[in-house]
Amino acid sequence: MDMARNDKIPKERTLDSSLALLSEGYLFIPNRCKKFQSNIFQTRLLGGQKVICISGEEAARIFYDREKFKRKGAAPKRIQESLFGKNGVQTLDGKEHQHRKRMFMSLMTPERLKILIKLTVEQWELAARKWENTKEIVLFDEAREIMCRVACLWAGVPLKEKEVTQRATDLSDMIDAFGAVGPRYWKGRQARNRSDKWIGDIIRQVRSDKMDAPVDTALYTMAWYRDLDGKLLNLQIATVELLNIVRPIVAIARYITFGALALHDYPETRKKLQDHSQHYGQLFVQEVRRFYPFGPFLGARVRQDFIWEDCHFTKGTMVLLDIYGINHSPDLWEDPDNFLPERFNDWKGSPFDFVPQGGGDYIKGHRCAGEWITIEVMKTSLAFLTQKLAYDVPKQDLSISMVRMPAIPKSRFVMRGIKVK
């Protein structure tokens, strides 16, 4: 059935809303859901292509139904060429996706997570000693270098000290290109090309026995993983997937910066974190992930015709799930625009109402395999900031533009007078 016959779906009467998306950013879908008083509407994006936007817990549940939606063909080419890479796990479906996802989940063992936490603490300590002799630092810039070091050490990727700034910048620029056009996007594309060459050369050396890779690392796993036909992943795919481990760890620098901002804006939370409460640390990290803008939406294509909410979804239709809107929905969260970590004491753990890094199932679905890493690294990093450091926050522009995707405080959080406790 033609999607145009979805008479019950509110429709934007526009030839293309791409410019509106760029000018409204994270609020593009929530604004229209509010305008139409509906959690579903139709618009046109990506050169006039019909797109259905959906929001809410039930929308997320439908979105992650593998019989109704597929990821193949959903990620725009420009996103693959800067952020995800071509033919990465995010673009797969069915058995191929599950097989590739198992490769990632095999790295998320308790033992490997303990090593990751240890490396995170060590790198914060090394950096903090240098900061004591510096007038001021920009936390976001420092955090992405720390995360780059942590990611490479944990993944088994060799990283020379003289390369750290360039590699961290490149990985960050790839992330920064997601919602960009013009120079910021092309900067991300160039960063992608350099990163592909860097990681590809390393995997090539491992496969030719010119470099050793510890057996329990991501480098070893990606270099020697075999596809469903029993063949080694081709070099391009192995490169993409190893970057899909390293790059998201660098992306945690954004969440850490948001966490520092929350400690500054809500000083009552600092004392609670300083009390060494693991439980409160978990609540705080989850609220940072819910409250601050990270991923705006996710896309998929309809696998086969179906009806939901009395509306027809036609095979091949692009559908966007409103990530930011779900995390701020007053239907799901009491007082959603206030920062309240304690709200997670009552959270039931639904995989569809709290979706900062996607929803659904880890193994069979497309929920981010690195979510556990994000949570543990954030808890460790923010505990270090509160328990091990004393610092001043000078006057600066800490505003967050909801138009810029991905978002970051404008000043990137400047710190002065740093002392290690």
Image: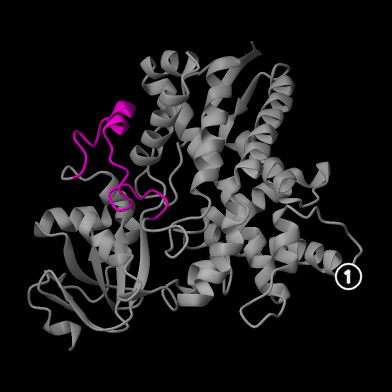
Relative depth, front residue between 164 and 273: 273
Q: Is residue 43 above or below residue 390?
A: below
On the rendered image, what quadrant is the C terminus found in?
top right
**Residue visible at 19% across and 83% down in the picture:** 3
Q: Is residue 192 above or below residue 73?
A: above
Colour scheme shown: one colour
**Residue visible at 62% across and 26% down in the picture:** 137
- Residue 357 in the magenta stretch? The answer is yes
Residue that mark 1 sits on: 208
Relative depth, front residue between 410 and 355: 355
> Around disc 1, counting alpha carbons within 10 Å, would you say few (fewer than 14), some (14 to 19), or many (20 or more)?
few
- Residue 189 in the magenta stretch? The answer is no
Relative depth, front residue between 225 and 92: 225
Residue 412 in view of the camera? no
Q: Residue furthest right?
A: 210
Residue 253 in view of the camera? yes
Residue 334 on image: x %, y %? 19, 35
Under circle 1, the secondary element is loop
Number of labelled discs?
1
Q: Is residue 230 above or below residue 200?
A: below
On the rendered image, what quadrant is the N terminus found in?
bottom left
Q: Quadrant of residue 111?
A: top right
**Residue visible at 45% across and 77% down in the picture:** 72
Magenta residues? 332-358
